Amino acid sequence: MGKFIAAMFATFMLALPARAEVFIDIDAGKVDPLPIAIMDFAGKHGDEIGGIIRSNLKRSGIFAPIAKNSFIDREQQFDKPPNFNNWSVINASALAYGQTKVSGESLTVAIKLYDIPSRRLLVEQTFSTDVGNRRRIAHIISDIIYSKLTGDKGYFDTRIVYIAETGPKTNRTRRLAIMDQDGANLKYLTSGNISVTTPAFSPNSQKITYVGYHGGTPRVYIYDLETSEHTLIGDFPGMSFAPRFSPDGKYLIMSIAKEGTSDIYEMELSNKKMSRLTSSIAIDTAPSYSPDGKKIAFVSDRSGSPQIYIMDRGGRKQERVSFGQGQYGDVAWSPRGDYLAFVKILRNKFYVGVMFEDGTGERILASGHTAESPTFSPNGRRIIYYEEGVPDKNGDADIVIKSVDITGFGLETIPTPTKASDPAWSPLLQ
């Protein structure tokens, strides 16, 4: 990502208070989507950039882009303010427009964002990069609009890693794949010669950890997106499940099965030293660090059924926090530290939900025939997970990645060309 940033410049030409008159309080629960007008940018590739921004903001569930055929003004000179009356009459609360300039392989994109009721210019910013980066520029601009109008960081300039599954269920090929958060720019990171599973991003770098199986033996790897190198971290003859990075990226946490039980271990990556954090006759699995790295959430059946527990970083003070009906699994800590995401099985149905750290405030967001592996967007606002549908007569079923807001609204399917499982969200790109 360094070359991209080196080739990009951005200049704020207007500094305003963090909260404009048009402001969405996204922490107030469900909010009515904000009507926003986003014009196609003037110039080459401008319609593509405008379309990506509209699509991003609409999928967030927080914004309601106004249809272009409702616009009174179909063109707008970049160096002049808009006719505010013409945007007010179609109930636009905010207006974004811009222009592009192409010279060879170089692309310059300028954006303006206006608060229509107050008639104030909120943002004026310019970017320069390669033409091939135009989709990413659109995602960055989407984040700028999202941030200015909500006060929170966006999540559009991110990627999702997942397992692409092809072939019959009895002989499935599972490859590591990565795509933009909207499903574009798909790239396969492994060839499919070994089966891979449970990828996860480092919270502070473009590195991915995953499990690969060689002759039935699980091995933990780290893949560096900057160098395209796969590094073997260790062999685990028993079974290893779902390695996850610590917030500082210096440790991996995972569950390892031995002799009919599984416990949680932490590995220091600099020397591969392993520390055992749980020791019981139960199955302890699915560990997830708190964003400050001081606590670990995990799932254990020590009480007779799978439930969510929290312990200190060193394995002390192991306390159960889930007490609702059903069996809990796949716990994940929000980057904001406010919620735990989980999967719950109740009466043969799967549910995806969130709860506070102490187990209170449980809220179901989605359900399905099966639902697994929830993970948060880097701003903690949305959750992705995968859902497997009802099997057909041959035992096969669709497997898709879904995304939902933490309020439970805005449920959508992220398009993938194959069956897709085990999704994990990247941090914001740098």
Image (cartoon, rainbow, N blue to C red):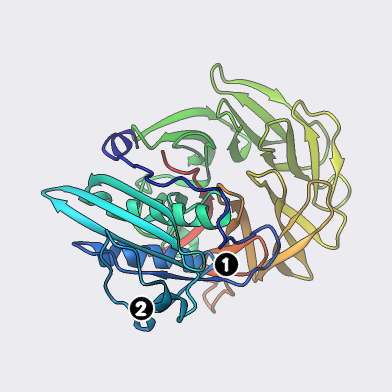
Front-lying residue, 208 or 181: 181
Residue 180 numbered tag: none
The residue under the point 88% across, 51% down is: 304
Q: Amino acid at mark 1?
A: Glu
Q: Residues within 10 Å of mark 2 (few under 14, many from 20)?
A: few
* Circle 1/circle 2 CB separation < 8 Å: no
Q: What residue is shown with label 2?
A: 68
397 left or right, relative to 52: right
Which picture quadrant has residue 327? bottom right
Where is residue 192 drawn, in percent x and y? Answer: 38, 49
The residue under the point 31% across, 48% down is: 126
Is residue 261 at least partly visible in the picture?
A: no
Where is residue 391 drawn, in percent x and y? Answer: 57, 74
Q: Amino acid at mark 2?
A: Lys
Mark 1–mark 2 distance (CA, rounded to whole Å): 36 Å
Local SS, label 2: helix
Q: What residue is shown with label 1?
A: 388
Q: Residue furthest top?
A: 271
